[in-house]
Image (cartoon, grey):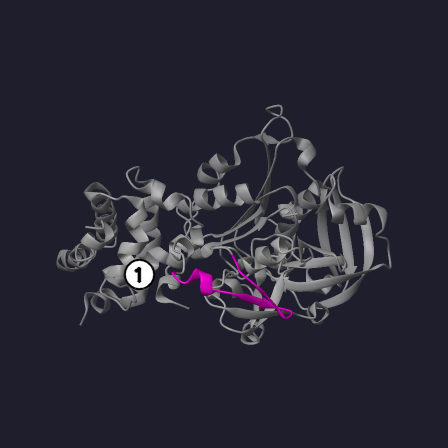
Amino acid sequence: MSVYEKIGGEAAVNAAVDIFYRKVLADERINEFFDTVDMEAQHAKQKAFLTMAFGGPNNYTGKDMREAHKHMNLNEGHFNAVAECLVGTLQELSVPQEYIDEIVGIALSVKDDVLNK
Amino acid sequence: MSILGRFGIGEQGVAKDQDAVKLKFRGKEYSPEPGESVLDTLLRSGLDMPHSCKAGLCQACVMKTEEGIVPDKSQNGLSAAQQSMGYFLACQCVPEQTISVASIDQTNLRVALKVKTIEPLSESVTRLCLEGSTAFRAGQYVTLWPTEAYGRSYSIASTPDEGVLEFHVKNIEGGRFSAWLRDEAKVGVTVEMQGPMGLCFYNAEADAKLVMTCIGTGLAPMIGILKDALAEGHSGDIRLVVGAKTEEGFYEESFLRELEQLHENLSVDFLVQEGDVGGLYQVADIYEYATNEIGELKGSQIYICGAESFVKKMKRTVFMAGANMQDIHSDSFLASAD
């Protein structure tokens, strides 16, 4: 069973996305990247991202992640900020640490694509 | 639609074979510029295509595709039936492949309604009522076409059982609809109506807390939704916060104050940006008020209507203050693009 199924599938993503999106908008290190876009569209993207990070069904390819983030000139600091928001969200939802570790592992697997390395 | 398009990547990227993407219309072929909508391509070529908001809301620019597939985004807001017939919004359609499009006989999308009432609500707002029994939900919007040449969108301030569709029209200097309303409209005159559209209507649990906030003629859908909720016996708290720069910006105050007297669960706040403290109206910043003065937002159904900049900022304000994204319902009012 994937960690996505273990923590509750789509319901878990729905519970997490508002919390995660709020944290990202409040985080000075990264909020500029999320500020300009239409909130509903951004919310949908967050939902897609969390689904992927939880090991759920998604259509992302490494190339998509790379293409989408290339023009933003992101660095480790940006990536870590997002990861922190993700971990904070999961902690707020009382997700067990071992699942948090699994999810962080999945997020790390796309790091090179996101940072265009 | 491509996988890239599903994540909005197509919006930034450019199709590698942009040169091969053509637009066919009425037997002619056009070459869209990268990122250019079907509407803009045709307008640029000198064609007089119907349109208004250029934001995918008013549906004045609806066309139909006869060959080729249009991006999902260009069908947002259209009914399932309309989508299956290939209808799309020309202002939102940036073709990713060659498509052949056609105008639709828009009269099929419209119904003729008679003007029943025209009366001033304030120096800058006019109440316009059209006789009709079309199916709609209070708070939805329609596009009104006084003539074939132009359509403008307005939110419905009445409930279906009133037998009319009520609109609050802001008098805009140099505005075509404003001019028509002032100079040509009178009782009995016919107007074509397209719609209803939009998702900003009452759909909450009877005991939910409702928070409604608006500026200007954003009050129109709020009044509609309020009447709807009360008619349905809504028992939860309803908090309506109306903002304006100065007290001259308010209208329908006595109506709202009376409603407040009649319904214990309703409270109405009028906020001004500039005014005398201790007067009839509270001097407050509406965003700060929403964050701090109306209690817990989490779990409340939030309705926001008015100018685009207000709606964007208020959406963000209530979201950050704890409201769930799926509980935020809004309509932005955009001035016509022309």
Tell me if residue A83 is in the magenta stretch. no
Quarter of the rendering occupied by the N terminus of chain B: bottom left
Residue at 78% over, 64% down: B113
Q: Can residue B133 be seen in this view?
A: no
Total marks drawn? 1
Q: In this view, does B64 lie above or below B318?
A: below
> Where are the magenta residues, as a range?
B16-32
User: Residue B211's x, y, as percent?
Assistant: 52, 48
The residue type indicated by label 1 comes to Val
> Mark 1 sits on what residue?
A13
Q: In this view, does B97 lie above or below B11?
A: below
> Residue B19, located in which quarter of the rendered image?
bottom left
Residue at 58% over, 55% down: B40
Nearer to us in this view, A104 or B132: A104
- Left-right relation of B114 to B235: right
Nearer to us in this view, B129 or B100: B100
Nearer to us in this view, B156 or B34: B34
Residue at 61% over, 52% down: B53
Residue at 44% over, 42% down: B317
> Mark 1, residues whose alpha carbon is within 10 Å: few (<14), some, or many (≥20)?
many
Q: In this view, does B171 lie above or below B42?
A: above
> Residue B11, located in which quarter of the rendered image?
bottom left
User: Residue B251's x, y, as percent?
Assistant: 70, 40
Q: Is residue B272 visible?
A: yes
Tell me if residue B26 is in the magenta stretch. yes
As drawn, the residue found furthest toward the top would be: B276
User: Residue B52's x, y, as percent?
Assistant: 65, 53
- Left-right relation of B252 to A13: right
Chain where mark 1 sits: A
- Left-right relation of A82 to B266: left
